[in-house]
Image (cartoon, rainbow, N blue to C red):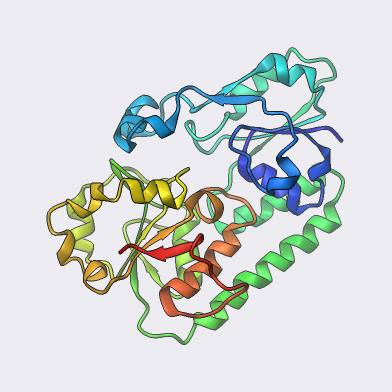
């Protein structure tokens, strides 16, 4: 089956199902698994270079604080048509972070053969795992998808069991954008809960909005997690002064305890794909020093010095 993925998380799912060889098109941000996607044609581009802009400038460029402006993705409809896809995977969860279902549907309407467009809209960890089965059914590997879902669910439960008796449960603020400040919602509060923490400023499944710095100060988190959407850890480090220069930074319990962590957001927290399970395993180590899965590497999580 000829698959085009217009969502990095969907590419992760296709790979998890063992069907990466069926990918004939992807986005410019689909980077996992590296070897499997390296030779797959790219059908999207960014309207600007995020590396050349600050967090505030990126936010303004995509429509400001409402997070509902134009997408970062431009779709090459000519290239898409040339690939003759049978299935196009996209999303309708965020207007900024990927090609939307509406945009993808408009693009394929003129293509011969009428490819099937599937929109993924997970908001919780269970939704993320269910997407694996939804995609698997469409791609003809339903039973394998159910097996992979069960294996991922078992890993999550193992994280819960290994952190269940740990006390105290640290109070955690997770930040997915630095300027304006934006708390991480959707599945991230659940990742924190599985790892033995208490998520502040966002509820499970919530599509969050920008917050004032005073909200973070008032919450007095024991742990602060920095996981900006789309930023590799080294990019987060480049902009750390956006936080460290704020009034009262040094007074935060998390800062005083040396419990400010930089995480790989795109790999384990921002994208609703199978690797969110690894994100929970990483947090078990971060919050309680509990080993879950493979050892956590500095590329996955490190303290902000």
Q: Give the total number of marks visible in the rendering.
A: 0
Q: Is residue 27 left or right of residue 67?
A: right
Asked whether 194 or 29 is in front, the reply is 29
Image x and y of residue 156, in percent: 60, 70
Image x and y of residue 67, in percent: 38, 34
Q: Is residue 135 left or right of residue 174?
A: right
Q: Quadrant of residue 302?
A: bottom left
Above/below status of 62 relative to 123 = above
Q: Residue at x 79, y 44 (%)?
A: 20
Above/below status of 27 relative to 110 = below
Q: Residue at x 68, y 54 (%)?
A: 130
Above/below status of 291 relative to 267 = below
**Which residue is outermost to the left?**
247
Image x and y of residue 105, in percent: 67, 22
Asked whether 179 or 64 is in front, the reply is 179
Q: Residue at x 26, y 74 (%)?
A: 257
Asked whether 252 or 118 is in front, the reply is 252
Q: Quadrant of the C terminus?
A: bottom left
Image x and y of residue 76, in percent: 64, 18
Q: Residue at x 71, y 52 (%)?
A: 132
Q: Quadrant of the N terminus?
A: top right
């Amino acid at each position: 089956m000829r698959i085009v993925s217009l969502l990095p998380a969907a590419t992760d799912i296709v790979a998890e199902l063992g069907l990466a060889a069926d990918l004939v098109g992807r986005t410019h941000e689909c980077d996992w698994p590296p070897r499997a996607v390296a030779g797959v044609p790219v059908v999207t581009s960014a309207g600007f270079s995020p590396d050349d802009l600050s967090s505030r400038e990126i936010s303004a460029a995509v429509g400001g604080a409402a997070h509902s402006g134009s997408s970062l993705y431009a779709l090459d409809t000519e290239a898409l048509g040339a690939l003759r896809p049978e299935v196009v995977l996209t999303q309708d969860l965020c207007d900024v972070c990927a090609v939307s279902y509406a945009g993808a549907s408009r693009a394929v309407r003129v293509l011969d053969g009428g490819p099937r467009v599937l929109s993924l809209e997970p908001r919780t960890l269970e939704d993320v795992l269910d997407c694996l089965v939804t995609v698997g059914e469409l791609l003809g590997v339903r039973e394998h998808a159910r097996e992979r879902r069960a294996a991922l669910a078992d890993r999550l439960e193992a994280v819960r069991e290994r952190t269940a008796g740990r006390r105290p449960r640290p109070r955690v603020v997770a930040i997915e954008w630095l300027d304006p400040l934006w708390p991480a919602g959707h599945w991230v509060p659940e990742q924190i809960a599985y790892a033995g923490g208490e998520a502040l400023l966002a509820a499970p499944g919530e599509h969050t909005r920008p917050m004032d710095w005073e909200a973070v100060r008032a919450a007095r988190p024991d742990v602060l997690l920095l996981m900006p959407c789309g930023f590799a850890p080294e990019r987060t480090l480049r902009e750390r002064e956006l936080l460290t220069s704020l009034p009262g930074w040094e007074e935060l319990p998390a800062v005083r305890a040396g419990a400010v962590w930089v995480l790989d957001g795109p790999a384990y927290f921002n994208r609703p794909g199978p690797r969110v399970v690894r994100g929970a395993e990483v947090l078990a180590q971060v919050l309680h020093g509990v080993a879950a899965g493979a050892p956590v590497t500095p590329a996955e999580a490190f303290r902000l010095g």
